[in-house]
Image (cartoon, coloured by chain):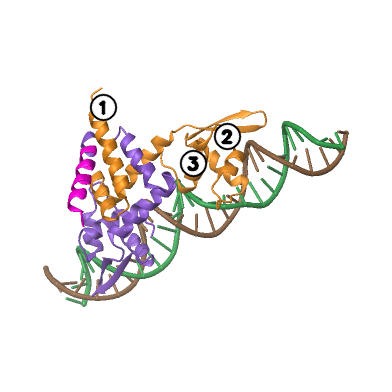
Chain colours: A orange, B purple, C brown, D green
Amino acid sequence: MKLTEAEWQIMNALWQKHPATARDIMDRLPAGVNWAYTTIKTMLTRLVEKQAVGEVKEGNTSVYEPRVSQQKARLSAFRSLLDQAFDGAVGPLVHFLAEEKQLTAKEKAELKRVLENEAESKGE
Amino acid sequence: MKLTEAEWQIMNALWQKHPATARDIMDRLPAGVNWAYTTIKTMLTRLVEKQAVGEVKEGNTSVYEPRVSQQKARLSAFRSLLDQAFDGAVGPLVHFLAEEKQLTAKEKAELKRVLENEAESKGE
DNA sequence: GTCATTCTACTACACTTGTCGAAGCCAACA
DNA sequence: TGTTGGCTTCGACAAGTGTAGTAGAATGAC
């Protein structure tokens, strides 16, 4: 499930709260994204075709629901980035993050902590 | 500097070793990417237009050189991912990484290892 | 009932991206 | 010197993307 940039905007709005109508989504789009109503409808139609979103008619109006979880979409985007730009491995990415100082000490600590918890509690 | 998927392939090959000719790049493309020679040339032309790559004629043949560092390209791709899919913050990403069961144990171990090494050697 | 509002369904259209093919230019070799 | 093989530049074309307008149907307010 590959989403385009514009589609991410829609999905982000939809994940925020759903089900939602096209108009709901329109209102929730980040300031700065001023798309025409029909643009949003077009996006939604395409997302429905892609099965990323479900559509149910309620009276005259369509109501939409995500069909792929944010988690799944994130995973897919993350994997793509990894494959494309980081030799498909987490190592180079982490390395990069560290080098680039993109991770604050706090974030590193958090990441480590969560990973460790995982390792321990993972016995289940 | 936004690179497309195909462009990443080219750039990856070019960063590997440069300067390089189109043919060099062709040979270095990952198995499975079997592009016609002219496809590669097209990509290179577009990359030159975009100023991601420099081109110098050597006799009859063009020799190419990256003009954006891998580091920079990675940063840009990383930022895009963050903005698009992780609310623009590293926090959610770290969280995701930890939650994500799709990461293999190996990848997690790698994460931890790199973080630890960083913490130690990166005292500067 | 009629009008304004609001949906929906269709259509459109320029730009980008992924992939070449064709045709011409040049150096080296039989 | 004519042929071969590699290089180059141009042009092309189908799909995918971003962005929206239009027309017609349904709904709610007088």
| Nearer-the-camera pick, A121 or D19 | A121
In the rendered image, the residue lying farthest to the top is A124
The quarter of the displayed image where residue C23 is located: bottom left
Q: Magenta residues?
A: B108-124
Residue C6 in percent (x, y) is at 69, 39
Q: Secondary structure at mark 1?
A: helix
Chain ID, mark 2: A
- The residue to which callout 1 is attached is A121
Please name whichever residue, B19 or A11, is drawn nearer the observer in this view of the structure. Answer: A11
Q: Mark 1 or mark 3, which is nearer to you?
A: 1
Q: Earlier in the sequence, mark 2 or mark 3?
A: 3
In magenta segment, residue B114: yes
Percent position of residue A102, x then y: 32, 52
Neighbourhood count class around disc 1 (C-alpha, 10 Å): few under 14, some 14–19, many 20 upward = few
**Label 2, label 3: how many angstroms apart (C-alpha)?**
12 Å
Relative to A78, residue D4 above or below: below
Q: Give the SS element for disc 2.
A: strand
Looking at the rendered structure, the kind of residue marked 3 is Asn
